[in-house]
Amino acid sequence: MISRRRLLQTALLVGMLPVSMVHAAVRPRFYNPFKVPPLEVGRREGKHLYFDLQIQSGLSEIIPGLQTVTLGINQPFLGVTLRANRDDHVHFKVVNQLSKETTLHWHGMKLPAKEDGGPHQSIAPLGQWESDYKIDQPAATLWYHSHQLHQTGAQVYHGLAGMFIIDDEESQNLNLPSTYGVDDFPVIIQDRDFNADGSLQYLTTMRDRMMGKRGDTLLVNGVINPLLKVETALIRFRLLNGSNARTYQLEFNDQRSFSVIGSDGGLLEQAIEVRSIRLAPAERVEILVDLSDGTMPVLRQRPHDLRFPQREMSMMNRMMGEEQEFDIFQIDARKVVNGPVTLPSQLVSHSMYRDIPIQAERSFSLQMMMNPARFMTQDQFSINGKAMDMNRIDEVVKAGSVEVWKIKNLTMMPHPFHIHNVQFKIIKRRGRIKSHELGFKDTVLVHPNETVHLMIHFPEYRDAVNPYMYHCHILEHEDQGMMGQFVVT
Ligand SMILES: [Cu+2]
């Protein structure tokens, strides 16, 4: 495994570090160019958009001088950024060039179950899968990634994940920064471990299996230590925690405030000013940052406490590594010329199914089996006492209905709970619901001993055969059984 210090030494040896590293206070501390993933807007015929996606493997130079075997979509490492409008009818032709089965799941999208790209839509080696649906939800920052049964952790870790941006008229009328790669940037945050030969190191310890895989090297859009040069004062970042297991508490090193404008499912009703935000695996948040001061702030992960209650389990917390501090990327705003900016306050209004009565309540208990006899098997984790079974439908939901789902965490660590095909609202949790958790969500972090109540409006897609998934988005937990299936009829 290569530590940060070792990386730095290697970089110094091969002369990769500019002299400016020494004068960190006034010059950039980060040195790799920020990578903006290529944008793929498809081939348009009226309202129909056609995308050709190739799931491929490749070699990537992530660490200077070393080649890493990676996976990607239309590029060697990670996916291209997809972009489409609300009401577009998208058509994906996905070709699997790998020698193993894989899938592509459209995370956060409301769509018919057979188009969802879950474990039931596996694509054979050299096979092809088509997915067609109409985008019927507001502008949002979604993503797409592998959802192969028992292999999601490994495949996403090696690169099968990308961003999917939806636009709509309402958001465009707000005049938010929206020029991709100019004042609107994807920021996919991932942590990885590398072996000495540059290969990605995955699941070598029992701790990785139980707590989820965390790495000591931070990547943004696949790049270590990126420096982003910007020239306009108001910048929008679409932050995606694409990590397998790590939760981040994000802040700038100069403690500047920023404006949260969007959550998983789209824009908030009002912008919310904060200095720090927590982002669990699979969560997204859109933020606006005022850089009119022309400085070089660093976005970093602040050591934080995910314990609940606060006094217990500090040992577990250390095991999870959330006490580590990381610098994630640096912004160089020295060329910003335009003056002070005004942040919008009012954004969009959320219709909240106020007129539809709640038709059902369901409870889900997240459990860890901790049975030594079952170590190394694929069912260490469960929901309501059952590990994932492709042949078992756990819940049947009525199309168009509103339900309350109560997610209860009976384990000693937090789990980010994700539901396919919906954008829910968090209506009750321990403590106050704040910042991005006020918006529409498809993933919510549930703390130990906490029960989080979600209000969910299920779209009108009916299919009694093909199920959707709900699961923990710590991918090693999902792969080891913390997943269930529901159909909508
Ligand atoms: Cu979990």
Image (tube, grey):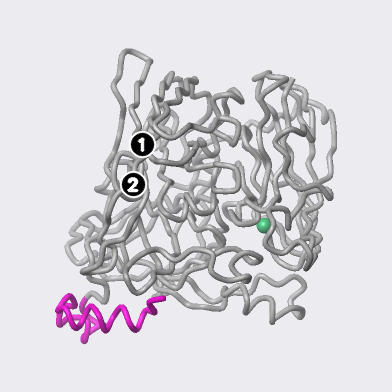
Q: Nearer the viewer, residue 357 or 375?
A: 375
Badge 1 local density, few (<14 within 10 Å), some, or many (20+)?
some
Amino acid type, callout 1: Gln
> Do we see residue 18 in this rendering?
yes
Q: Is residue 422 left or right of residue 190?
A: right
What x and y, as percent, mark residue 440?
Answer: 60, 41
What is the secondary structure assignment of the residue under circle 2? strand
Q: Position of residue 3 (x, y in %)?
A: 39, 79
In the rendered image, the vertical position of residue 446 relative to residue 296, given as above or below: above
- The residue shown at (64%, 31%) is 351
**Residue where numbered disc 2 is placed:** 57
Magenta region, residue range: 1-27
Tell whether label 1 touches label 2 (CB within 8 Å): yes
12 part of magenta stretch: yes
Ligand 1's quadrant is bottom right
2 or 1: tag closer to the N-terminus: 2
Crowding near pointer 2: few (<14 within 10 Å), some, many (20+)?
many
Say the numbered circle drawn on residue 251.
Answer: none
**Residue 227 in picture, x, y percent from top left:** 26, 65
Q: In this view of the protein, can residue 445 be seen by the observer?
A: no
Residue on which the image places disc 1: 97
Task: From the viewer's side, name the closer residue of 159 and 353.
Answer: 159
Quadrant where the N terminus is found in the figure = bottom left
Amino acid type, callout 2: Ser
Identify whether 175 is placed above or below 9: above
Q: Nearer the viewer, residue 253 or 81?
A: 81
Q: Is residue 147 above or below residue 207?
A: above
